[in-house]
Image: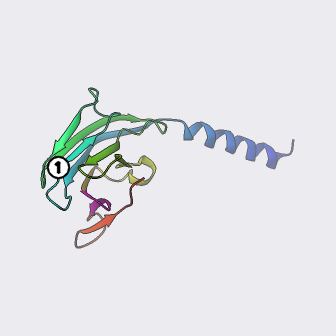
Amino acid sequence: MSLFAKSVSILWVFMLLSSNNAMAVKNLVIEVTNNLAGNLDLNVSCPNIDSAHEQHLLHPGTHHQWSYSGYMQPTKPPFLCSFQWQGQGASRSFNMYVPTLDFYRVQSHWYIKQSGPCRMDSLFLPMPTYVCSEWE
């Protein structure tokens, strides 16, 4: 095998092994606020982070907060949460923290709307802005 082929093979194996490793997170805070139109209650469930698999009922304008320190497995994201409200039908899901994208964040504040979750983003901007996503 040529030197180039060996180098590529070793690099490929390293990338494969590192993609399956857990990522350490310390003192991460995720907050969710019910910002649904129509004065609706919101049920939030994050089974990978809540050991009791409990749902949190958020009345309009109220919030719930999770603090997390530990390891995140790529196959079991702790902040993959489901959201449900009256008249919606099936629950919606969204991953509120993706380690490979959000590694620099220690706090994320999400506002849940019918159209999707919006995060207050003020990390690199002089004025806070809302970055909205679509439901998964």
Furthest residue in direction top, as rendered: 52
Residue range (magenta): 112-120
Which element is circle 1 on? Answer: loop
Residue 114, magenta (yes or no):
yes
Residue 9 in percent (x, y) is at 74, 42
User: What is the quadrant of the N terminus in the image?
Assistant: top right
Residue 34 in percent (x, y) is at 19, 53
Task: Compare residues 96 and 23 and report the one nearer the observer.
Answer: 96
Who's the residue at 28% across and 49% down the image?
106
Residue 98 in percent (x, y) is at 41, 49
Who's the residue at 36% across and 53% down the image?
104
Q: Quadrant of residue 128?
A: bottom left
Is 8 placed left or right of 102 in the picture?
right
Who's the residue at 33% across and 44% down the image?
82
Residue 32, magenta (yes or no):
no
Residue 87 in percent (x, y) is at 26, 52
Location of residue 32 with respect to 118 vertically, above or below: above
Q: Quadrant of residue 54?
A: top left
Kindly identify which residue carries mark 1: 41
Q: Quadrant of residue 12?
A: top right
Q: Amino acid at mark 1?
A: Asp
Furthest residue in direction right, as rendered: 1
Q: Magenta segment, principal secondary structure?
A: strand
Task: Compare residues 64 and 112 and report the one nearer the observer.
Answer: 112
